[in-house]
Image: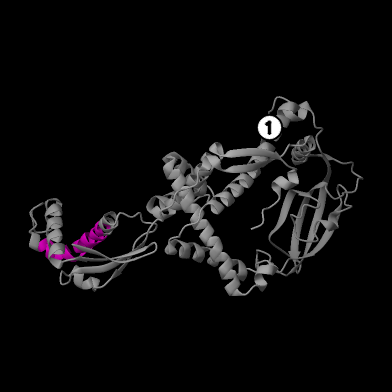
Amino acid sequence: MEVTQTKAEGLSRTFAIKVPASELQAKLDARIEEIRPQMSLKGFRPGKVPASHVRKMFGKSIMGEVVEGLLTETNQKAIEDADVRPASQPDVQFETEMEEVLDGRADLDYHMHVDIMPEFEPADVKAIKLERPVAEIPDEEVDEAVARIAEQNVKYEPRGKTAKAKDGDALVIDFVGKIDGEAFEGGTAEEQTLVLGSGRFIPGFEEQLVGAKTGEEKEVNVTFPEDYQAENLAGKEAVFDVKVTEVRAPETPEINDDFARGLGLEGLDNLKELVTEQIKGEYDTASRAKAKRALLDALDEAHDFDLPPKMVDQEFDQIWGQLQQEKEAGRLSEEEAEKPEDELKTEYRAIAERRVRLGLVLAEIGRVNEVQISEQEVQNAVVAQARQFPGQEREVLEFFQKNPAAMAQVRAPIYEDKVVDHILEVADVTDKTVSKDELFAEDEE
């Protein structure tokens, strides 16, 4: 095996690697001898298949395994001998036809390109000074949240038989829908509850039942929307014969201990405690996000070093691809939509460079401080993602198990958050009281 470094520019390294055909053949023979005792082929006793027959039948595929293993082995040796840390997966370019290599007629001759990690001293995180915005939870916000819970638990009580239905009332109705005088499938129901103003039914249906009384029969004329999910009904006019069997008025429960106990709690104070805790979680999340942004700004300002070009290119390509999707969907801001493409690319390459720089800095701080993530943390994150696809959980889990790159994408944000939490614990962080609006205001990009 011959390994020669042919290029060393900045953070890019290129190696010329050659494995003679004779060495490949020797490794092929060794691999055949390794697997031959376990082979069972028709016409031969188990474990007694001649090496020549194995080579004839499976030599090419086995050589493929040998070459794949050698690529990993030689690339690793080249990196170790050069005493560098790779920043990306090696990029391999073959100089010989792979078909000839697998047939044993040519040397394995290729170039391996790799970006390496820059050498830098991470900033002393204990010396970083930050302000963490915090806000007090006003009592009225808790009261409003409790009131929303009460509204979600509204009950409907029957109105008098002569009472006219109003927006917000619940009607119990029977109906038959017809198109051109003929009842259509899915257009008939009995004892259907409909809250007027909820927008559950076809546009125009609910409005025509405002003012209806218990026992009243009404004819409701509507037109199905052009984009209605049932294509056979889309855009068509329909008539619904509706009978109102009952009109019910909404009654929001009184907010007291009995209401809280109806929710399975000890009382109103217990309900307010739980609501306060939930709101506090939202405040804490916003506070941490602001502190993290300030921390990343401080780390970015404190570090200036060359970046692996391939990592920057990959990050830029991802950002630019997302931007193009937003553009095609018409979701770009007016300001960005009017900018020349060259200007946009310059701005987004700067963003890509910042992300790569911060990623390297956080990774180095985590390495130096021995920040670790457990397999259980990773597994919990994978399971959480799988739950976003009900009925396909097993397939999602198998996808991650079989795709190391996908698993790495799950690990990355978990690790980043743990490093950020570590820095926030040891840095000089001062809490600064701000208003709720300031706390939840979106940061400018």
In magenta stretch: residue 62: yes
- Residue 86 in percent (x, y) is at 36, 56
- Main secondary structure along the magenta-highlighted residues: helix
**In the image, is 265 to the left or to the right of 71?**
right
Foreground residue among 27 and 250:
27
What percent of the width, then of the height, locates residue 234?
A: 69, 68
Q: Is residue 311 left or right of residue 52?
A: right
Total of numbered circles in the picture? 1
Residue 393 showing in the rendered view:
no
Tell me residue 293's x, y (percent). Answer: 60, 49
User: Would residue 442 be found to the left or right of residue 88 on screen?
Assistant: right
At x 59%, y 51%, the residue is: 297
- From this viewpoint, is residue 433 visible? yes
Tell me which amino acid carries mark 1: Leu
Residue range (magenta): 53-74
Q: Which residue is mark 1?
A: 274
Q: Residue at x 50, y 50 (%)?
A: 391
Q: Quadrant of residue 339?
A: bottom right
Q: Quadrant of residue 222?
A: bottom right
Query: Relative to residue 11, is residue 296 depicted above or below?
Result: above
Residue 289 in the image: state x and y as whole percent. 62, 46
Mark 1 secondary-structure assignment: helix
Quadrant that contains the N terminus:
bottom left
Q: Is residue 255 magenta?
A: no
Q: 394 or 379, which is in the foreground? A: 379
Residue occupying image coordinates x 81% and y 61%: 204
